[in-house]
Amino acid sequence: MPQVMEFKLPDLGEGLTEAEIVRWLVAVGDVVAIDQPVVEVETAKAMVEVPCPYGGVVTARFGEEGEELPVGAPLITVAVGAQSMPVGAEESAGAEGSGEAPRPLIGYGSDHSRPARRRRVRPVTAAVSAPVTAPAPVAVAPAAPVAPVVPVVPAGPAVPAGPVPVISPLVRKLAKDHGVDLRALDGSGPEGLILRADVEAALAALREPAPAPAPAAVAVAAQGERIPLKGLRGAVAEKLSRSRREIPDATCWVDADATELMAARAAMNAVGGPKISVLALLARICTAALAKYPELNSTVDLAAKEIVRLPSVHLGFAAQTERGLVVPVVRDAQGRNPESLSAEFARLTELARAGKLAPADLTGGTFTLNNYGVFGVDGSTPIVNHPEAAMLGVGRIIDKPWVHDGQLAVRKVVQLSLTFDHRVCDGGTAGGFLRYVADCVESPAVLLRTL
């Protein structure tokens, strides 16, 4: 006898409470294998393919593409051991049919290269007898036109009879709490699906009289373009706002002659092997500077009123993508050489541009390097990446007139900016750190003392 299992949106880590459905990878009636990705979701940190811990036939999906679901909300139901399953799927679901506990989920975001596997079959609804305590799946809207009047019925235990084209548990709860009969609403979603906006519009129409019509030009000017502050953009906004609220930051900067650094890089790349990036050399300089000035590789514990100096340098670097600004993290950067740093920067940048970074790739940083010179600008005042204590900003490296060995010459010059949390150190420490970085840029041989 098939068993219907409900798979809910899992906790994707780092305190995330909801996720937006980007793309369904399976449809109702498809056969899925254990640990097969069934949906691609976007959290405030990354795009993640979510694998299902059950093997069988998909009997229902909950949520449309573009809809946000809270952690714990149903995603799909799977009939384990259904007769329409192929031989391979029956073997995967054998443990379910025998009463054994289902297998646990494999780590989320750990394998982004697996293609979604879909096999379309005719669902065997008669063989599925176990009840599913989940919101009703999408049903096709009735052919008869729905009356435009929105009746309000007293809230109570009675459940409307007949199929209702709504799948979100949040929409059902909103309607129930305010006494809205979902059967009387005309959904604006696909195939008449009732969305949260439909319920809210019905409530607004009941509470307030219709406003007087205004000229079209005035209405457009008053409304403007509204862009939802959610997902990655919302997470960035919240983090930057929190940084400004909590961290008393200060910025110092210096111009440095990078001619010798660029010459050293050219010499490294001339001997063959993987190319060394400028960012990797700057990162190696930063880790050496943090070893001399560990105050800047720390965080502030407000609850305990303590400064916590961190033993490892998990180096974040700002990367601009189509989804916005993200900060991937290179783990244990203090133990990497320029070649290893170049390879890791390249790997994480590629994943960031493809939207395939896992949440673990974007968290846990202790210091951030921001190369805004790639945008063609010379300087900036970085905002500290909360809860870190400092960020080094690097402008573009360009030819400028410079006094070298007592003579005016054209040299490659870069501006370096350090924004730091004034609670963890004073200006002397911040200035010493920045001066050491500039000295290493001007004379890479200074690094030999720390290698």
Image (cartoon, grey):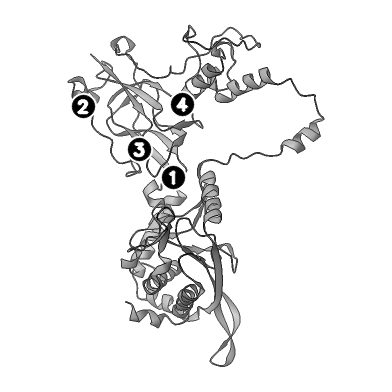
Q: For the residue marked with disc 1, what is the amino acid? A: Ala
Q: Which residue is mark 3?
A: 115
> Which amino acid, mark 4?
Gly
Task: For the residues labelled 4 and 1, say whether their Cβ atoms are less than 8 Å apart.
Answer: no
x and y percentages locating residue 397 in the rendered image: 54, 72
Q: Kindly identify the residue that appears in the image at 37 percent across and 37 percent down.
A: 11
Q: Which residue is mark 2?
A: 101
First-in-chain label (4 vs 1): 1
CA distance for labels 3 and 4? 22 Å
The location of residue 256, given as percent across then percent down, is: 53, 78
Q: How many numbered circles are shown? A: 4
Dot 2 or dot 4: first in sequence order is: 4
N-terminal of the pair, mark 3 or mark 4, is: 4
Quadrant for residue 90, please give it. top left
Q: Which residue is mark 1?
A: 46
Q: Amino acid at mark 2?
A: Ala
Mark 1 surroundings within 10 Å by alpha-carbon count, few (fewer than 14), some (14 through 19), many (20 or more): many
Earlier in the chain: of badge 3 and badge 1, it is 1
Q: Looking at the image, which residue is at 51% across and 60% down?
A: 384
| Circle 3 or circle 1, nearest the eye | 1
Task: Tell me where residue 240 appears, x and y as whole percent.
Answer: 54, 53
* C-alpha span from label 2 to label 3: 27 Å
